[in-house]
Amino acid sequence: MIQESLIEGIFRSLRKNAGWATIIIGLTVLTSAIVNRYFPTIYESQALIRVMTSENASDVSIAASMNGVFSQKDVLIELARECGLSADEVINQSVVSFEDAGAGMVKLFARHNDPAALNDINKSAIRILSDRFLVFGAEKREFEIEASQKKLQHLEASLNEARNMLVKASTEMTVKVDDLTLQLENELHQLEEKIDINGKKLQTTPETVFYYQEEETREYKTISRKLNSARNKLAELFKSYKEKHPKIVACKAEVSSLEKKLKNSRTRTRKQKANPEYIALSAEIESDNEKLDLVKNELRRTRTMTSSNEKLNENRINNLNLRIRALEELHNRTLLALEETRISQTTTQGKISVLKNESNQPRPLGFSAVQRDCLALFSGVLMAIFLLYSPAPVRTEIVSVSGDVLAGAVPPSALPMLTAEPAEIILEVPSLSAEPLALPAPELRNEPTIYDERLIALNNPYSEALAPYRSLVSNLQIHISESQTRIVLVGSAKSASGRTTLLANTAILLAQAGYSVLMVDANFRNPVLHRVFDLESRGGLSDALRTGLRPEHIQKTSVDNLLLMPAGIVPSNPAELLGSPEMIELMADLKRKVEIILVDTAALLEYPDTGILAGQTGAMVFMHREGESEDELKAAKKLLKTIRARVFGYVKA
C-alpha cells in the first residue's frame, strides 16, 4: 500500500536521482540550443494587393494561381538575386506565399529568419508578380484545356468499361448448383437413414445376454481323479495284455462307469453379461449423431454463403448502375468546363495594382528562441519525473535472521546450497514461496477444527505451516504493486493439486492485511470453494454471466474484507461461457468493487477453461505439486506461452 502522496513521491524520486535528473534536464536544454542553431525562428510580414481582371473567377482561387507563379524555379532565382539571398535558400524554403483576402484581394506573406530582409522580399515579389501573373494565367488555362481533354478520354473509357461489365453481370447465371451443398445433403440423408435403422435395431437388441457356466463340485473332482487313475491303469495293462483280456475288459468297464458318473456330477449355472452388440450399436448411434450435427452446421453455413453470393451479385449490378450514372454526369460536367475554359482564354484581360505595400511589424512563427528554451526546460523536468519516479514500496513482512548468521558465525559450508528447482528451470518463472505449502497442515488433520481443515489461516493462525503462505502473500503484494494487475488466477497442470487450499488461505491473509478481496470460483468442472467457506452455491458466476451482475451473486464470508462469488449452476458449455465478452465485462465491473480478485480455475492440461481465462485477464500463480512429471510441466509451459499468459511465479506443494 502506498505510504505517500504523488507530489511527495515525485520530490523523493528527484532527490534520490538528482544526478540523473540534472543530466536529463541538461540534455533537453542542449537539444533546444541545437534546434535554435540549425532550425532558427522564422519571422513573417504581410502586404495587401488588389487584382483587377475581366475573368469571372468566383470559383477560382487567385492566391493559388499566384502561388503557382512562385513555384517556378526561374522566378525564385530572380527573387533571390534581387533580394541578395541564396538561391538554394529561397528554393528550398517557402519564402513567399499568398492567401485570398476577399473579392479581388490577396494577402502576400514573406517569411525569413532575418527580419530586416522582409521588406525587400515584399517589394521584389510584388514587381515580379505584376510581370508574370497574367501570362501564367494564360498558360494555366492551356494546361486546364489539355487536362480536361485527357479527363474526357479517361471518362469515356471508364464509361464503356462499366457498361460492358453491367451487360456481363446481367447475363451471367446467378444461380449455380453447389456441389458441396449436394454432397452435404446426400451425406445428411445417409446419416439420418443409418441412425434410424440402427435405432430400430437397437430396440430389438437386448441389453444383456445369458450364458451357462459349468462348475466343478467336490464329487466331480474325486471322480475325475479316479477316472485319471483308471485310464493310467488301462494304459499300463495294454502294455502287458491284449485287448480282450479280462483285466482290460474290466478296466474299460470301470473307465466307462467313471465317465458316466463324471458327466452326471457337473453342474451348470446360468449367468448374464452386457451385450457387446448393444454397446457397439449405442456407440455407433452416438457417433453418427455427432457427425449429423456437424453436417447440419456445415450445410447451414453453405446455404448462408450461397444466399450471400446472390445478394452480392445483385449489389454488384446496382453499384455498376450507380457508377455509370456518376460517370455520365461527370462526363457532361467536364464537357461544359472545357468549353468555359476555351471561351475564357480568348476573352480575359487583367491588371495588378498594389493596394498596400508597407509590411507589418515582423512577428515570429511558432515559438521564439527564449520560448523554446523555457519549453525545453519544462519538458526536461517532466521527462525526469516520468523516467525517475518510482512509487513507494508495498508493505511486506521482514524475515528475521539470527545474530550468529549476521555476524558470520555459521560457516559457509553449513549454509544450504542454492539450487534451482526443476519446475523453476522448466517454467522459467521464480518461486513465490521459499518452502513447500502444507495442504493442509499435518497437525490439523487428526484434530477437530472450527472451520474447514483446509483453512489453516483460521484454524491455527500461529501455525508454522502458514510461513510459506505468508511468504507467498508478501511476494504477491510486490508483483501486484509493480504490475498494477489486480486479477490473479490460481492454476495447475493437473487436478487435485491443492489450488483451492492455496487460494483460500492466500485470500484470508490478504484480507487480514487490509485489502478488499473477492474470490471467484471459475472451476465449473469441480466447484468446491463455497463448501470450504460453508456457503451456498446459489446465484454465482454462471448466473452473473447470463443475466448480469447483481448483489446476490456475491456472498460475505466469516472473514472481514473477504467476499466470495461461487460457481453457481454448472453450465453445459464452461469454456465458451468463460471466453465470452460477458466474462471480460464482468471482471471489469468486479475490479471497480474490490482491490484484489483471486480466481480458482480448472486443471490447465485437462480442460481449456484456465487457458482461456489466463489469455484474457490478469496474471497467474502456478501450483506445482511434488510428483508431477517434467513432461506435464513442459506441456503446461508450452500452453501458457502459446496463449501469452502472464505468470507471476510458481508455488510448490
Image: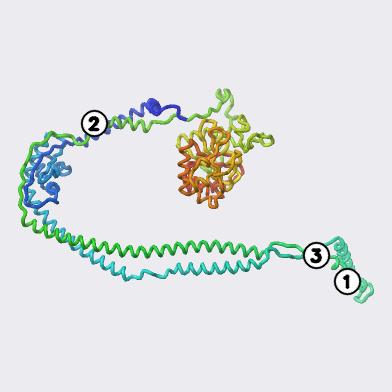
Residue drawn at 63 percent across, 33 percent down: 459
* Type of the residue with mark 3: Arg
Q: Is residue 412 left or right of residue 53?
A: right
What's the coloring here?
rainbow
Q: Quadrant of the C terminus?
A: top right
Who is closer to the viewer here, 441 or 84? 441
Query: Which numbered mark, 3 or 1, is in the foreground of this view?
Result: 3
Along the polypeptide, which appears first: circle 2 or circle 3?
3
Horizontally, is 281 left or right of 261 in the view?
left
Say if residue 247 shows up in the picture: yes
Rendering quarter of residue 13: top left
List x then y, in percent, for residue 404.
58, 23
Work out whether residue 258 or residue 608 is closer to the camera in this orientation and state it.
608
Q: Mark yes or no: residue 600 visible.
A: no
- SS for callout 3: strand
Type of amino acid under label 2 = Gln
Q: Mark 2 vs mark 1: which is more N-terminal?
A: 1
> Which residue sits furthest right?
246
Are the residues at dot 2 and dot 3 in contact (C-beta closer than 8 Å)? Answer: no
Residue to which mark 1 is pinned: 256
Q: From mark 2 to mark 1, how far is it between C-alphas?
A: 130 Å
Q: Which mark is residue 268?
A: 3
**From the viewer's perspective, is 132 left or right of 18?**
left
Q: Secondary structure at mark 1?
A: helix
Foreground residue, 347 or 77?
347
Q: Nearer the viewer, mark 2 or mark 1?
A: 2
The amino acid sitting under disc 1 is: Ser
Residue 204: x and y, percent?
65, 68
Mark 2 = which residue?
371
